[in-house]
Amino acid sequence: MRKRIRNVLIILLGSVAAGALLLALAYCLPVESARAHVEESLYEMLEVAEDPDGNELRKKIIGFKDNFTDCLMVQNALERVEEKNPWEHAMYAYHYDLGNESTWMTEKSLAAFLRQGSDGMYLREYSRYWHGYLVYLKPLLICMSWRNVETLLLVFQVLLLLAVLVLSCCRKNPYLGLGIVCTFLFMKPLGIWFSLTLSDCWTIALAAVLVMLLFYDRLEKRSWHEELFLLTGILTAYVDFLTYPVVTLGVPLCAWLVLRPENCGGWRRQLSGTFWNCACWGVGYVGMWGFKWVLAELTCRTGTLRNAVWAVIFRTEPLDGYGSAFTGISRTFRAVLNQYDSAVYGVGFGIIAAMALVSVVLCLVRARSAGWAASVVCLAFAALLPFGWLAVTQNHTAIHCDYTFRIAGVTVMALCCITVCSVQALIRKAKVCRDFSKPVKYTE
């Protein structure tokens, strides 16, 4: 236990220091070429949506994505307040906005900021988040136009998904790759592929699965899987805007359970490994986020710590008009389900759930074992993670259900992996039966 705590503290504190330093260095970069690249792309980013003769495909792309937050992210990459140093920028995350303190107008503000400067605009700060995406977004905008940045990120995501699928087949586990594809389809992939905001969590989840596929044996031999989940939680807090972060826990956890051999350490180790992976992710996510508030408060007296605590209280309180946390859960659940506006999703989920149920029943009859049961129990727990997240953050989940609904992808992934584990157990049982049924040849 002491070694585990020591490793967690070293990695967490090192990540806080490295993350803050990288952000400060990003704010040291010049902004002139980035502003020029974004200004020449404003039509494609914003104005084409209001143009009756504009490109229809481009309009659809803007409709898929979270353009409000994307514009905020881009503007954060262009800011340079003269009287503020890079460290203050890293802690405060300044941006100019046309709106008042409670209502930001990010799309109009980005266009106004680039074309007429900051005159008549209000200086706002968003110190509650790390804004770690600036570490890669700002250099990209310095080097190329927004359209090229968008294309590059899309290609990267497609290649990352293909790499996961190919490696799943190479590890003789193609059904894991199929489960990831099914999960992605339930998360409305076009919105993820074309949006800066919505791509972060899915990219982190896929990257964690890719690391497992590449180095699973080494991770298990050296017991580094907990550190992997810790780093996954840290990276999620560093770059994400609280979109659907539980996916970066649920998807890698399901992959880890599928890749883990059934007889690896017994069922107790399976259960304890699942617990510690989740605990390390939680410590990484909450710890990294919390240390940003503390660091900003200690070095700049930002008031971030106080504001962030009140924001957490607000985001976790019952929905408006509800007396307790439990009474708003059903409304939040309906808001999430309403995002699946096609009967195809209902049919698809029904098929996936039925396959999981049938495979479990078959295994109970023909191939049950302690290792298989432990895997199914852990995957069932993973399937419930979105409901726990929904209950705790119901206010935020309901208000922003147009992108938070993607937490349901974890449930889809877990059900697919239950089927995979059960099918694998049935195949192993059938192989053993065939081996026993073969005649024994005696030699003199």
Image: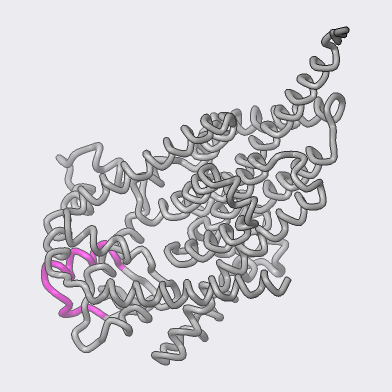
Tell me where residue 51 appears, x and y as whole percent: 17, 46
Nearer to us in this view, 363 or 269:
269
> Is 345 on the left or on the right of 364, as rendered?
left
For the N terminus, the quadrant is bottom right
Residue placed at 61% from the left, 41% from the top? 413
Tell me where residue 317 appears, x and y as whole percent: 63, 71
Tell me where residue 18 appears, x and y as whole percent: 41, 73
132 in relation to 333, above or below = below
> Is 438 on the left or on the right of 421, as rendered?
right
Residue placed at 64% from the left, 35% from the top? 416
Confirm whether residue 390 shows in the render: no
Instruction: Look at the image and give the residue range highlighted in magenta.
Output: 105-122
Residue placed at 17% from the left, 68% from the top? 112
Q: Quadrant of residue 273?
A: bottom right
392 in relation to 249, above or below = below
Tell me where residue 364 appears, x and y as whole percent: 85, 30
For the C terminus, the quadrant is top right
Residue placed at 71% from the left, 44% from the top? 379
Confirm whether residue 423 shows in the render: yes
Q: Inspect the magenta stretch and tell me whether residue 115 lies in it.
A: yes
